[in-house]
Amino acid sequence: MTDKPSTPISSGCTNTSCCPPPQSPVTRDAPKVGRNDPCVCGNGRKYKKCCGKCA
């Protein structure tokens, strides 16, 4: 015999001090820059070799 409760368990916690409510998704003004896209600073290198190297 299993020890499962007869009532369904909710998937979320109702205690807001330990589990804050879900936030709305982030919306960007410009499209996301990919690592292999040209760098946004305009020097012609890939983003991963230029400004994305330190990020």
Image: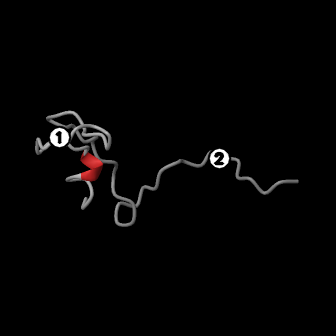
Which x, y percent locates residue 49? Answer: 27, 52
Is the residue marked by circle 2 packed among few (<14), some (14-19), or many (20+) residues within 10 Å?
A: few
* Left or right side of 27 for 9: right
Q: Quadrant of the C terminus?
A: bottom left
Closer to the chain start, of discs 1 and 2, is: 2
- When the figure is inspected, residue 24 is found, relative to residue 18, above or below; the finding is above
**Residue linked to disc 2:** 7
* Three-letter code for the amino acid on which mark 2 is drawn: Thr
Residue 10 or residue 50, whichever sits in front = 50
**Residue linked to disc 1:** 44
What secondary structure is found at the residue carrying circle 1?
loop
Which x, y percent locates residue 12? Answer: 47, 50
The residue depicted at 54 percent of the width and 47 percent of the height is 10
Is the residue marked by circle 1 packed among few (<14), some (14-19), or many (20+) residues within 10 Å?
A: few
The residue depicted at 29 percent of the width and 47 percent of the height is 23
Which x, y percent locates residue 40? Answer: 15, 42
- When the figure is inspected, residue 20 is found, relative to residue 47, above or below; the finding is below
* Left or right side of 21 for 32: left
- When the figure is inspected, residue 40 is found, relative to residue 21, above or below; the finding is above
What secondary structure is found at the residue carrying circle 2?
loop
Identify the image's colour scheme: rainbow, by chain, secondary structure or one colour: secondary structure
